[in-house]
Amino acid sequence: MARILIVDDEPDICWGLRRLADRLGHSADVASDGDAAVKAVASNVPDLILLDVRLPGRDGLQIMREIRSRHAQIPIVIMTAYGDLEIAVAAMRQGAFEYLVKPFDLAAVRQVIERALQPEVRNADIVATTSDRLDDEYPIVGTSPAMQAVFKQIAMVSPTDAAVLLQGESGTGKELVARAIHRFSRRRNGPFIVAHLASLSPSLAESELFGHVRGAFTGAEESRPGLLERADGGTLFIDEVADIPLILQAKLLRALEYREFLPVGGTRAVKSDFRLISASHQDLARLVAEDKFRHDLYFRLVTFEIRIPPLRQRQDDLEPLVHFFVRQLSQRMNLDPPTWNGAFLKELRARPWRGNVRELRSALEYAMILARGGPLRREMLPPPLPASPADAPTPLMTLHELIRCWAEANLTVDVTDGNLYKRFLEVVEPPLLKTVLQHSRGRYLTAAKVLGMHRVTLRRKMQQYNCTERTQPNAQN
C-alpha cells in the first residue's frame, strides 16, 4: 500500500481523488494549500504527490521546487485547469512525472497513479532542469482543455530532438507551435528556418531545400546554401510537407537519415545537424495509403505528432483571443483598445471560423479600422469565409466528429464503472435499428438480413430500447 498526498483547494477534487486512492488500496492525505503540503511531506514522506498549480498563497510550481530540493525521488503529478504553455514547460523542466489537465476522468488518473507507483519510478531520482523564463515573441493564446493538451505535448517533446509532425487546419497556428517547440528546446540559440515549398516547382523546391553550386543551372551565377544547411544547429520547419514532390521525398529522407546531402549540381556532401518539424493540413496517413506520400519518409516525420484543434472546437479560447488581438492591433495602430458588447461576442461565437485563428485576427482588424477608435459592433465584422467544396464534411466525417465529441464529453466524468461502451450503444443503436426497420416497411426478417443479425435478436433489441412500433401495421415478420 502506498501513501498519496493530494494538494488541492477544491474539496470535490480532493474527495474524488481520495476515493480513487482508497479503491486502489492506497492511503491518501489531503492538503488545501502549499504550506500544509510542505508540512505534510516533512512529517511523513509520501510515495506520490498529486499537486494543483493554482493554490492559495504560493503556487504549485513553487511548492514543487521546495519539495524537490529535499525529496527528489518523489514522483509529482501536476494538475491544472488554468495553465498556459509556460506553466506546462516549467512543470516538465522541474521533473513533473505527469501533467494532468482538468477536468480529467478518474480512469486517466488511475493509470497515472499506477505508472507513478511502479518500483523503478519510486526508486529513481527524477532529473529536473532549470531555465530562465523566456520572452514569448510568438505567444499561443488558449485556456481550453484542448489547448492545455497541446501545451502539455509541447512541453514533453521540446527537450528532445524528435521529429514532430503538426496536424491541423489552415490558420490554427501550426507555425506558432513549431516556434514554441524550438524556443523551449536545447537548440533555441540556433536558427529557426521556415520552408514554404507548396507553391514551388520540383526543381525550385530542390534548390530551396538543398541549395546549389555555381553553374548548376541557367542563372546560377554563384553558389547558394539551401534551407537544410542554414538550419545547422537549429530547427527546420517545413510547412505543408504533404506538398513536397515525390521526386524530392527520397532525397529528403536520405538527408534525415544521414544528416548530409548533395546540393544541386554539387559533388561534395554537405553535413547539417538540424531538428525537423513539419506541418500539414492533410491526412498524411491517408496519402501514404494512396501512394501519394512515401511511407518511409512518413515514419521519419511522425516520431511525435501534435494535433492542433480548430477554433470551433475551442470556444472557451475565443474571448481570450479577442482580448489578445485587440490589444496587439491597438498598439500597432496607435489606438486605445476599443470596447465591445455582448452582441459582438455573440456574433463571434456564432461564426464557423473556417479560417480559424488567422480569420479571427483579420476580422478584428477589419472591425477596428471601421470603428476608428470607437466601440466594436457586430455589423462592423466582415462576412464569414464561404465554405469551400473541398472542405465540406462528408456524412462519415460528420459522424466521426459527433462520436468523438460524445466520447470526450462522457470522459469528463467518472467512467470507472466500465459502462461507457454500453451507454454508447444505447445512443446509436435505436436510431439505426428504427431507420432500417422503417426502410424495410416494418418487416423484421428483411431488416434483420440488412443488419446482419437474427430476427429474434432484432426484435429483442427493439423491445429493449422501447422502440417496438412499426411503420406498416400490416407488415409481415
Image (cartoon, helix red, strand yellow):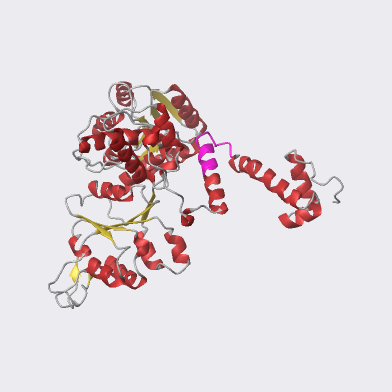
Q: Quadrant of residue 77?
A: top left
Residue 97, placed above or below residue 38:
below
Toward the left, the furthest residue is: 222
Q: Nearer the viewer, residue 267 or 92?
A: 267
- Residue 114: x, y in percent? 44, 40
Residue 325 visible in the displayed image: no
Q: Residue at x 21, y 35 (%)?
A: 331
Image label count: 0
Indicate the position of residue 39 as horizontal and vertical percent values.
30, 22
- Residue 207 included in the magenta stretch of the image: no
Highlighted magenta segment, given as a residue range: 405-418
Whether 296 is drawn above or below 132: the answer is below
Residue 466 visible at all: yes
Residue 95: x and y in percent read 29, 40
In this picture, is 237 found above or below 347?
below
* Image quarter (top left, top right, bottom left or bottom right) of the N terminus: top left
Write down the quadrant of residue 298 in the picture: bottom left
Residue 339's quadrant in the figure? top left
Queried whether the magenta region covers residue 411, the answer comes back as yes
Which of 241 and 367 lies nearest the eye of the viewer? 367
Question: In percent of the image, x 44 and y 25: which residue is there?
Answer: 14
Q: Percent from the top left, x then y, of residue 396?
A: 56, 53
Quick check: 80 left or right of 188?
right
User: In this image, 314 relative to 218: left or right?
Assistant: right
Question: In the image, what residue occupies the spot 37% across and 33% down?
Answer: 319
